[in-house]
Image (cartoon, helix red, strand yellow):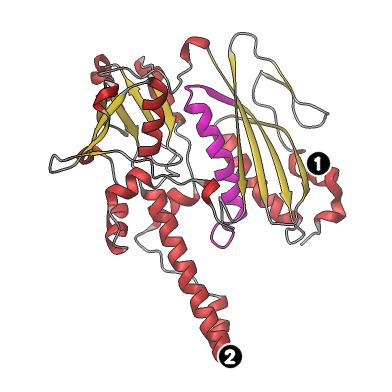
Amino acid sequence: MTEISKLGEFGLIHRLTDNIKIKNESTIKGVGDDCAVLHYPDSEVLVTTDMLMEGVHFDLTYIDLQHLGYKSAMVNISDIFAMNGTPRQLTVSIALSKRFKVEDMDDFYSGLKLACDKWGIDIVGGDTTSSYTGLAISITCIGEARKDDIVYRSGAKDTDLICVSGDLGAAYMGLQLLEREKSVYYQQMDEARKKNDKRALEELRNFQPDFAGKEYLLQRQLQTEARGDIIAQFRELGIRPTAMMDISDGLSSELMHICKESGCGCRIYEKNIPIDYQTAVMAEEMNMNVTTCALNGGEDYELLFTVPIGDNEKIQQMDNVKLIGHITRPELGQMLVTRDNQEFELKAQGWNPLSKEE
């Protein structure tokens, strides 16, 4: 393993970026100068930034650096798709402590490049520095869209249909599964240390949880996928959503954002919320309400969008999209209709990173 300090900042940058090939005409100059140079003559520029902090957004106990690189890119790419845009360039800045080696950064960039290659995105710059508190990642994704194609949160109107891609709650249940196994592991380690049981300690060093039958939940948590395939279907079918967001903090929270920005109400139906079988089984195993998990879990990175009611037939032609409700007048509130036809007001109970305690 190679110490990062032996390479130095510029040596590390060259090692991680020298093999990057430019894929987009809008990228005039990528990594290697004081600034990247981009050119967008006929479209609007979309820019999104996310910061991911070790201990807040990810735990290296159960996510390796290649998966972390992939996920870090995808959560930014997802924001561009959520505006009905096309991602083109990405910058990445990393602050890392001395416990990380050059090979660790190779793994991180390997995942980053896999995500960018999947959607034809150029890595055009960034920064590296040291950290005393673990790993910090800041990624900016730049995209483009024609002015008339951009979809904001503020365009939903009364009678519009509410739709979601994929299924919900699986990423959250994957996180609960990983957290449970982590807790069990550390509990067993503590007990073995107290008893000075050297045999048990050696066995625990090679401990591997049994995740058989739960692979989908882990994939949804560890290998986030941005839904560019849904954007492609919009273009094939001639659909332009009236409002759209990606689901990072939970369906309930994101739908309430759309209602607030659009000045409207909503009505969604519990029976229509798409939930995978593994998600339902895991929720039952952990004595959790699966609908609550789907509404508030977060990290699904599916697309939540509204379309005019006249697009209903087109929506039925879309793969992996479910109609879950409709937009209403604001005075009717933001409501969930349960399977037994009771109505409850939606609550924004999604994850809030700013509430993380020290």
Against 53, residue 19 (above or below) is above
- What is the x, y in percent for residue 296? 37, 45
Q: Measuring 40% from the left and 64% from the top, which residue is drawn there?
A: 211
Against 41, residue 174 (above or below) is below
Total numbered badges shown on the rendered structure = 2
- Res. 135 visible in picture: yes
SS of the residue under disc 1: helix
Q: Measuring 75% from the left and 57% from the top, which residue is drawn there?
A: 132
Q: Measuring 54% from the left and 85% from the top, which residue is drawn there?
A: 192
Q: Measuring 66% from the left and 40% from the top, which residue is drawn there?
A: 138
Q: Categorize mark 2 by other alpha carbons within 10 Å: few (<14), some (14-19), many (20+).
A: few
Name the side, left or right, on which 119 lies relative to 300: right
Q: Is residue 285 magenta?
A: no
Which badge, 1 or 2, is on the more N-terminal residue?
1
Q: Residue furthest left?
A: 340
| Front position in the image: 48 or 153 | 153
Q: Which residue is tagged 1?
A: 14
| Front position in the image: 110 or 163 | 163
Q: Is residue 73 magenta?
A: yes
Task: Considering the whole magenta stretch, tell me its main secondary structure.
Answer: helix
Against 80, residue 342 (above or below) is below
Label placed on residue 63? none
Q: Quadrant of the C terminus?
A: bottom right
| Front position in the image: 16 or 184 | 184
Q: Amino acid at mark 2?
A: Asn
Q: Which residue is tagged 2?
A: 196
- What is the x, y in percent for residue 87? 57, 26
Rendered image quadrant of residue 197: bottom right
Q: Which residues are magenta?
A: 60-87
Q: CA distance from mark 1 to mark 2?
A: 47 Å
